Image: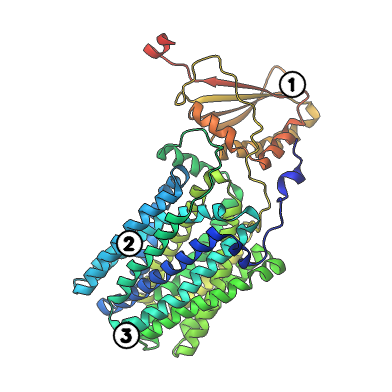
Amino acid sequence: MATGQQATRPANPPSTSPFDAFRHTSFTVVWLATVVSNVGTWMYNAASGWLMTSLDADPLSVSLVQVATSLPMFLFALPAGAMADIVDKRRFLIVTEIVVTLVAAASAVLVWLGFINPPILLLFTFLLGVGAAFTAPAWQSVVPSLVPKQDLAAAVASNGVGVNISRAIGPALGGVIIGGLGIAAPFWLNALSNFGVIGALWWWRPSTSGGHALPAERLRSALVVGLRHVRYNPHLRATLIRASVFFFFASTYWALLPLVARNQIAGGPALYGILLGAIGVGAVGGAFGLPWMKAAFGPDRIVALGTVGTAVSLILFGFARHPVVALVACIVAGVSWIAVLATLNVSAQVSLPDWVRGRGLAMFVTVFFGAMTAGSVFSGQLAAMLGLPAAHFIAAAGALVGIALSWSWKLQGSVEIDLTPSMHWPVPVLTINAEADRGPVLITVEYHIKPERRTAFLIALQELGQQRRRDGAYAWDIYEDSAQAGRFMETFLLASWLEHLRQHQRVTNADRVVQDLVRQYDATAEPKVTHFVAAAFGSRALDE
């Protein structure tokens, strides 16, 4: 029988350096390929943002480029996350990346032929965003397959370093290429950069656990169960709230940076690329300081400090009339961005068991880009009404207020909870024909509690109820016998017999600790568990 200490202590101490993840060949190969692909993506982002300032310099129109990039994440990340949990992630990523490459090539052709205008540019930016939305949850959920658990935080930090290396190189390279080869060149290079990712995925062969004999979930059911898990997972919910507050206000400088470079500083595409690159440089530097920051401050204070840094950068952007001021703002923004993003990402990762990781991370991506989308529209409208400086100053004030408003929601900093499956539930006994899709299934658990332990028992049972619902149950409740003191009946429903079998596989070691605590209050040796399957009617009932 597991104890609380055994269930919450990781088997190995977590890594402290981003370099630790590179001890694993699969991670290194995939990381290098994604860095190359992200360089192409950032060249595209810089080129599309600059191209829009030439086609339509209205602040709201320019901010819509950021909206077109982030809105698909808000719309499609959840179904994409469900698919990442129920299909082969590697094959799914290969197919999706091929489609993204074809769309990127089509956009390059249109720019090259001069057939581009604001609506078409926004359309293709949106379509590429859709591709990113469908791949983002799968990419994040394969990270635990590339490294062991103790290196997960290092892998997340290394991915942040990779993204920001590409952010440092891609925009600056894109600005130089636009000046030397024309506006279409970054669009072509973006399409070509995806071939490395496709090759790396084709080469990678993830290990198979062989522990899941049940058929895959259906998409609709997977979405419902995933949303229910997010609702009743307090650690993930806290991460989402902190993320929504930060990204809403941080989106301002991403959306308005093309106009800061062009109108406020009177620069060209090369300056815009350099400014984006400076954000990446700051983020890379910040990533190497993350282990020290984690040890010194912890996740909650890191996010607060990163938010303060973001507010400082927004104020500097508002005052920037010279490239040097804007460069300083970009470096501060980059350091702050990676500190917050990596901390929130780790908090989301360690809050999720493997069976729902894709859906949980999809919700994180949905909140991330939903806040970015709303914040971009908000800041674009503010800039159109009040001017660029005022939009930045208002966003800075909002970010600082957000620290106080979200402080009570605490983040997870490392592998603090053992979410590996416990597999300690016995296989239920069947004497009827319970087909896989037959349901709903009613589970009852009978307890006999001494009167003096009633309050403590009910408090502990509330936490167990949260776990039941996280693992797929609904309509959970507890009933007290009006005729027999101390007799309680816990009840909950599952959609089908197959869903109940899945619930057996979802129970974690951390869940087992709470269940053992609840059972300590029972005066009997073991609570009585009963399974009821919805009775069949009509011809099927006669056949049985």
Sequence-first tag of 2 and 1: 2
Residue 184 seen in render: yes
Q: For residue 161, which quarter of the picture?
A: bottom right
Residue at 55%, 74% in the rendered image: 284
Q: From the viewer's perspective, is the residue at label 3 or at label 2 nearer?
A: 2
- Camera-side residue of 150 and 55: 150
Measuring from the top left, give residue 465's x and y in whole percent. 62, 36
Discs 2, 1 touching: Cβ within 8 Å: no
Type of the residue with mark 1: Ala
Instruction: Give the image quarter of residue 20.
Output: bottom right
Three-letter residue code for mark 2: Thr
Instruction: Please say if 346 is above or below 418.
Output: below
Q: Quadrant of the image for the N terminus?
A: top right
Which x, y percent locates residue 449?
76, 26
Can you say whether 530 is above or below 37 in the image?
above
Quadrant holding the C terminus: top left
Residue occupying image coordinates x 46% and y 86% = 320
**Amino acid found under the numbered disc labelled 3:** Gly
Residue 101's tag is 2
**Callout 3 crowding tier (Cα within 10 Å): few <14, some 14–19, many ≥20:** few
Helix, strand or loop at disc 1? loop
How far across and how far down the image is residue 373, in percent?
A: 40, 63
